[in-house]
Every structure is written in C-alpha cells, then in structure tokens.
Image (cartoon, helix red, strand yellow):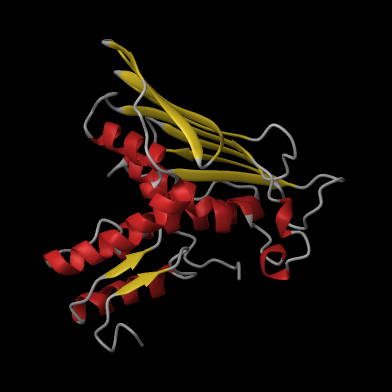
Amino acid sequence: ESLLAGKHVLSQKPFALDLDVAEELIELAIAQNVNLAVNQNGRWAPHLAYMNQAVREGLIGQVTSVDFSLQWDQTWIAGNEAFESIHHLVLFDFGIHWFDIANQFMGSREAKSVFAAVCSHDEQEIRPPAVASVIIDYGNAQVRMSFNAHCRLGEEDMTTIVGTAGTLRSRGPKLTEQTVQLFTSSGQSEPDLKGDWFENGFQGTMGELLCAIEENRPPANDASTVTRSLELCFAALESADTGQPVKPGTARKCKET
C-alpha cells in the first residue's frame, strides 16, 4: 500500500518470504518511481563495513574463503512464542544478516550450491535448533558459517576472509565489540573502528535511504541487492530440511513465519 501511495519504503529484514513476491515489489517500486530499501543493518556494522570496503578495493586480492564463527547466548528468547515458533531461528531470523554480508563480500560471483545442517541438544533452553552450519560453494571459493546460539559462557564472534593477496580478520566477544586486523605483504594493520552495530547499523540503513531520496538515486540497500541474499537463505533452509545441497534460486519460498 505504501508503494502504491507513492511512498519510499524501508522494509524490515528478511525482506520477503517468497522470491516471486520480492521481485513483484521491486518492479512496483520502479514503476512508482520510489525507493524500496531493506534494513540489512549488518552492512553498516563498523567491522563488517570496513572489511567489505577493503575487499571491494582489492586489498586482499580475490576472496578464496570466508569463515563466520559465532557462539552467542540466544537463550533470552525462551518463552517468547514469536521467536520460539521459528524453527530455523538461527538460519533465518539471525542468519539472514550473514547471508547478506556474505553476498556483499563475494560481489557478483554466483554461488553454485548451499549445504546446511542444524541440531538441538538435550540441555538447551530454547525450542529451535541452537546449532547450525552452512557451506556455500562458489566453485573456486567457499563461504562457511558456524553458529551456536546456546553459548552461556565465553561468547565469541569471529569473521575471517582469506584472499589471494591477504587476509582480513575481525574478532570480539560480541557483535558490538570487534577489532579488525588486515594482513598483506606490506605488513599488518589494525583500523581504529568507531561505533557499533546496533547504533551505526540502524543509522546506516535509514540514513542511506534518506540520502538516496535527497540525491535522487537508488540506495545501497535497495531491495534488488538483497534478493540474492534471500536465495542463499532459502536454499540453506531447504538444505537443512532435506539433508541435500540446494542450488540458490530453486527454493522460491520460505516456510518460516
């Protein structure tokens, strides 16, 4: 309705539960000459934004692998039916951020397949599977994700990007406390990052849309830039259900609500 009324829109993530609907909304926004952006706020988290820019500028050459390793405490959702009713909570509600940033890191390269697996353990306090892993195959590169949402002690969040000319690594006890290291043939450096995900991330998505409106251009978080992220996410969900690798784009709908 907002698009039909000629209004610019900032959609919450995940953008859509159906790729066909996502494409229709994008086409509608174009026809109405308005911007349709998505709140993929992880793109503006200081550590991920720095790493993404470093990759785009070729500081580490061609990316050959990306590893996301996250162990965090998600047990605060216990008893919250809105969250606990999402079977693939880790891969869907939380994981969409990582599918999106993986898509950013890999640029225009097309993923060939996605394989995912999840499990629960006897002592976990939440209903959805708390442990999940994903391998995205690009033929000449891989993105690997390892999640544990039931880490009560010693939480850690680490991202490592290895390229043909260097390595980027971020590490910290949580999303909002990260340090980044850059390793190249010239030596090692550590940027002085300012801000954190939950402030700068949301400022980034909203601010980018406002700037795009003022400058009469598509925003960097235009909905068209997240459809491939949805393809990766939906493929992972289907793979976790079937136990088989899935080609991105073939799983058109998401069963999660």
Res 36 → quadrant: bottom left
Res 193 → quadrant: top left
Q: Position of residue 195 (x, y in %)?
A: 40, 43
Residue drawn at the location 73% of the way across and 69% of the way down: 81
Q: Farthest residue toward the right?
A: 122
Q: Position of residue 156 (x, y in %)?
A: 61, 33
Q: Nearer the viewer, residue 246 or 191?
A: 191
Give above or below for 5 relative to 214.
Answer: below
Position of residue 9 in the picture relative to residue 154 (left or right): left
Q: Is residue 248 visible?
A: no
Q: Position of residue 100 (x, y in %)?
A: 41, 50
Residue drawn at the location 75% of the way across and 40% of the way down: 152
Position of residue 186 in the picture relative to residue 79 (left or right): left
Give above or below for 88 relative to 110.
Answer: below
Q: Is residue 45 visible?
A: yes
Position of residue 10 in the picture relative to residue 160 (left or right): left
Residue drawn at the location 40% of the way across and 37% of the way down: 47
Quadrant of the frame with the N terminus: bottom left
Q: Position of residue 27 (x, y in %)?
A: 26, 75
Quadrant of the frame with the C terminus: bottom right
Residue drawn at the location 29% of the way across and 72% of the way down: 26
Q: Nearer the viewer, residue 11 or 138?
A: 11
